[in-house]
Image (tube, rainbow, N blue to C red):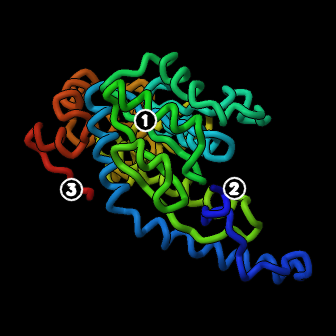
Amino acid sequence: MLENLTTEARNERTMRLDEMTVAELLTVMNEEDAKVAGAVKKEIPQIAKAVAAITDALRRGGRLIYMGAGTSGRIGLLDAVECPPTFGTSPEQVVGLIAGGSNAFIKAVEGAEDRTELGAADLQNLNLTANDAVVGLAASGRTPYVIGGLEYAKRAGAATISISCNKNAAISQKADIAIEIENGPEVLTGSTRLKAGTSQKLVCNMLSTATMIGLGKVYGNLMVDVQPTNEKLAERAKRIVMEATACDAETAENALRLAEGKPKPAILMILTGCTYTEALKQLELSQGFIGQAVKNTGKEATNR
């Protein structure tokens, strides 16, 4: 029942929200937002379990699939679409599903979230397998679309993870790993695009970033699989190579040209003096980890 959900409760600090000055209401919003990171921190043990499951799935050739409705669905989609340019993943490797289809990202599709069969159908259309990991997001923890998806995913043998903002959430019972972030009541009663949405975004940031680090897509704190698909990212790729190797701009540009614009092999070429072909081979042998690839060549990166 909605009245039993923390996300639907009234916040005692904002009972007179409509009478506050702009400065007062912004201050209370900011103070409430400051509680979110602490609420997420309490769930780090569960988030770590989720990262392990997702990393294992992707290593097996599976996919990370987010699914949700409304704000929750949009947050999952946002994280999914950022992975290819940031980490060089294919668009099929990290996927976002939203109740009502892609058009629902811009305009709500009424009633779509209330149908359990749509969640199952969307995963079926993706040809879900036991190698995949499905993350169901629902601030309330009771969205039928997400419940249907998690139930289908479990039957398929996929890893199942839930993210909700209420304790003892219904979707938690459908998942192998349940993440329950208790942010307290929203400033605007029931508006889960606020603290609940912020906390879900923080968790998705953690899941994808930690997973990609575990897959060798980061060197130090540099996104070495960034795709230079525009002028800004091309400049960033050059800077990444310079930072990773302590080389000058001309050396970085030359290495990137020989490496077909890919920072990771360009870095390895500079650090070890190998060719592009040799760099690709070493990176394959080291499962994408630059540090391990350098060690395999018998050399040592002294720039770190």
Q: Earlier in the sequence, mark 3 or mark 2?
A: 2
Instruction: Name the kind of residue labelled 1 in the image.
Output: Val
Answer with the quarter of the image where residue 295 lies: top left
Could you tell me how far apart the alpha carbons at marks 2 and 1 are, in whole angstroms? 22 Å
In this rendering, the answer to whether 289 lies above or below 262 is below
In this rendering, the answer to whether 105 lies above or below 221 is above
| Left or right: residue 303 compared with residue 110 | left
- Viewer-proximal residue among 294 and 60: 60
Q: Which is in the foreground here, disc 3 or disc 2?
A: 2
- The residue that appears at 45% across and 45% down in the rendered structure is 249
- The residue that appears at 34% across and 40% down in the rendered structure is 54
Could you tell me how far apart the alpha carbons at marks 3 and 2 are, in whole angstroms? 46 Å
**Residue 118, visible in the rendered structure:** yes
Residue 273 placement (x, y as % from top left): 21, 35
- The residue that appears at 38% across and 34% down in the rendered structure is 133
Q: Earlier in the sequence, mark 3 or mark 1?
A: 1
Q: Mark 2: few, some, or many residues within 10 Å (few <14, many ≥20)?
A: some
Residue corresponding to mark 2: 193
Q: Secondary structure at mark 3?
A: loop
Q: Earlier in the sequence, mark 2 or mark 1?
A: 1
**Residue 223, visible in the rendered structure:** no
- The residue that appears at 24% across and 40% down in the rendered structure is 289
| Left or right: residue 116 compared with residue 24 | left
The label on residue 134 is 1
Residue corresponding to mark 3: 302
Residue 155 placement (x, y as % from top left): 36, 27
Could you tell me how far apart the alpha carbons at marks 3 and 1 are, in whole angstroms? 40 Å
| Left or right: residue 151 compared with residue 198 | left
